[in-house]
Amino acid sequence: MKQYLNLLQDVLEHGEVRQDRTGTGTLSKFGMQARYDLRQGFPVVTTKKVFFKAIVHEILWFISGDTNIKYLVDNGVNIWNEWPYANYQKSDSFKGETLEEFIEKIKSDATFALRYGDLGPVYGKQWRNFNGIDQFNKLLSQLKNNPNSRRHIVSAWNPVEVEDMLLPPCHSLFQLYVSEEGFLDLQLYQRSGDLFLGIPFNIASYALLLELIAKECDLKPRYFIHTIGDAHIYLNHVEQVKLQLSREPKPLSKINIKNKSIYEIKFEDIVLENYQSWPGIKGKVAV
Ligand SMILES: Nc1nc(=O)c2c([nH]1)NC[C@@H]1CN(c3ccc(C(=O)N[C@@H](CCC(=O)O)C(=O)O)cc3)CN21
Ligand SMILES: O=c1ccn([C@H]2C[C@H](O)[C@@H](COP(=O)(O)O)O2)c(=O)[nH]1
């Protein structure tokens, strides 16, 4: 995962100090790209421990079209909790509950979850129902029936609905490419990338998406190309980033996915093999 470390190094050295929406402050560079060859291994960052379980649940959650955090929290994935909580704090029903109490209520009270667990029309909604269009299903059928197309695109960025989302999509658009030899490549355009917390998730997540789509379409996964608009390191992550840069990357892992239709694949059907990593590193998420 030298490519990821190169991004960190580059932004740390050449990023400009920039204010941001969360008030945390960042080092930032605009327009970066990295390319991962999945034939050489599955790209999960090794210079800190990445919570892969969250990535698998999240991608299955997107594919299913769900936008409510209930599925995630029921499965022990807590990466999206802060946003519905912040929203709840602004509502009339808020009675001073802590984040933990809020999540307990999401788990135990289905009506409450329905009302306060939703992120708005985020990824899952746009992939499966963009103003009535199931972009994801269309993509699969086009890849199978019209592989040479240059229009294999799914967009999560819906200007009509962006105001209703608790967080406008960061991984905004992706495109696929089928080569003459039956390889499948995926390029993601990510408008904004938190290099320490979000990006390791995003890399593994889209690499997994590429593996899943390739399997479904009987193609061989090859390049994941990650293009990032505003690539930033939050100022309160600088020490964590330096620690990662001091660590030697470990060999990449492998992914094993059961032969099943993409809509039937379950969490247990996706196994990351031989994942070796350095210990995890804590960092605060900017809300
Ligand atoms: N500032 C910011 N950065 C992000 O990466 C981000 C957002 N906001 N908002 C929406 C989603 C949520 N994402 C998140 C949120 C939290 C973690 C996080 O805290 N990760 C820790 C712990 C994971 C765990 O064990 O639950 C990590 O060590 O990776 C990662 C990605 C990615 N996105
Ligand atoms: O998948 C994700 C989702 C979010 N992020 C980061 C990028 C930014 O740091 C924040 C979003 O804030 P904006 O002001 O809307 O850009 O979340 C990520 O890296 N990956």
Image: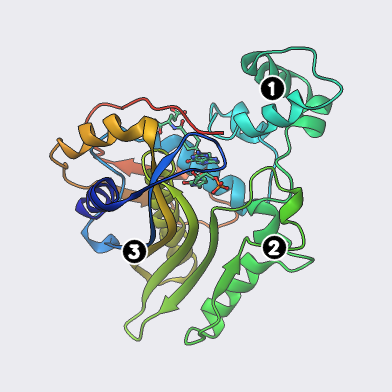
**Residue nearest the observer in this picture, 154 or 109:** 154
- The secondary element bearing badge 2 is classed as loop
- Residue 107 - label: 1
Can you tell which of label 2 and label 1 is closer to the viewer?
A: 2
Whole-Å distance between the Cαs marked 3 and 1?
39 Å
Count all numbered tags in the image, as a single digit.
3
Does residue 257 appear anywhere in the picture?
no
Check the image and report above or below for 34 versus 123: below
- The secondary element bearing badge 3 is classed as strand
- Residue 219 - label: none
Circles 2 and 3 in contact, beta carbons < 8 Å: no
Q: Residues within 10 Å of mark 3 (few under 14, many from 20)?
A: some
Can you tell which of label 3 and label 1 is closer to the viewer?
A: 3
Residue 204 position in % (x across, y down)? 39, 49
Give the side of residue 112 with respect to residue 62, left or right. right
Whole-Å distance between the Cαs marked 2 and 1?
30 Å
- Badge 2 or badge 3: first in the primary sequence: 3
Residue 273 position in % (x across, y down)? 28, 42
Q: Amino acid at mark 2?
A: Asn
- The secondary element bearing badge 1 is classed as helix
Rendering colour mode? rainbow
